[in-house]
Amino acid sequence: MSLSLEDLRVFRSVAAAGSFGRGAARLHLSQPAVSDRIARLERDLGVRLFLRGGRGVRLTQAGERLLPYAQRCLALADEAVTAVRAEDAPPAIRVAMHASFAPSMLPVVLDALAPLGRAVNATDAHSEEIIDRLADGTIDIGLVVPAPHPTTITVVPFRTDPMICVAHPDHPLARHTELRIADLAEAAIACTAWGPGAEQFLALLRTVPIPAHRLHTISPAETAVALARRRSHVGVLPRVTVAPDLAAGTLTELPVSDLPDWSLTLALAYRAAEAPSPVIHTLRSHLLA
């Protein structure tokens, strides 16, 4: 059995729109044509992909499992079209990085790869998805938090980054020269609660105690950054995530002296067979120096 890219494109559009009608409008197709394609796809797969209701449709569990594969297939097909139309230009270097590190690490990666004279296409994703995309060849380079991975993928840690507390310079806590976790009790906290040390930190906050309505675990990390920027929250984030804000002065690090040892490791990931390539050599030399 083979799957049609057009069927997958229709499936993705309906899933994003939440209805057959809106999904059809996005693709400039009629609703009956979209309904027919979804029905055919469901027959081919032998499962229902959508639950129909009065207010639209939502994905079944089977549909949720299919969606990331459909997105990757369509992205790879689009890249293939771009590549074959690109005359003599070398293919773009496809990079994916863990979303929490993307704002500060993307400029580093672009600077490192600039001497190669090739275009770079960058996306962000969770580390597990990045490893999957490396394995199936839809990206070339990943920046990930180390996690289990197949032997065909090489994962090389290059940076360990501490978790820190930050706030807007106008936040009341930003005026202090020394703070302890207990001093955070009156603040609203936006915490990216993942990685070693997260549970210990949350347990400390709960024993202060910080009321549950002021303690928020937030994902993605950029959302926690946005809350801190608007003066309403103290952010607890990896330093690399807020490095641009610290440099620009839009956020300031709070001097919390009893913050537990809590850090995240960032690693370069690539297919082991590609280790000799100029792209991998360049990034390894730049990041691991």
Image (cartoon, rainbow, N blue to C red):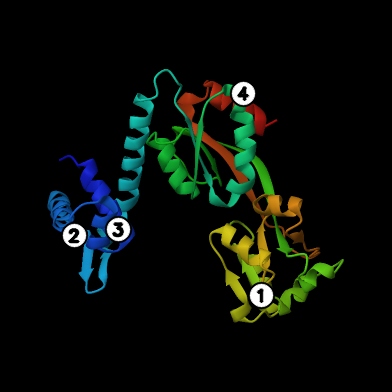
Lower position in the chain sequence, tag 1 or tag 3: 3
- Considering the numbered disc 1 on the image, is that residue within a helix, a strand or a loop? loop
Left or right of 104 in this view: 122: left
Identified at 72% across, 78% down, the residue is 185
Q: Determine the CA span between mark 1 and mark 3.
A: 35 Å
Which of these two is toward me, 242 or 269? 242
Q: Residues within 10 Å of mark 2 (few under 14, many from 20)?
A: some
Lower position in the chain sequence, tag 4 or tag 2: 2
Residue under pointer 1: 188
Circle 1: residue type: Ala
Residue under pointer 3: 15
Circle 2: residue type: Arg
- Considering the numbered disc 4 on the image, is that residue within a helix, a strand or a loop? helix
Residue under pointer 4: 115
Residue 248 in sight here: yes
Lower position in the chain sequence, tag 2 or tag 1: 2
Q: Where does residue 123 sit, x and y in percent of width and height? A: 49, 43
Image: 228 above or below 282: below
Q: Across the whole image, how many numbered discs are drawn on residues?
A: 4
Circle 3: residue type: Ala
Q: Determine the CA span between mark 4 and mark 2.
A: 49 Å
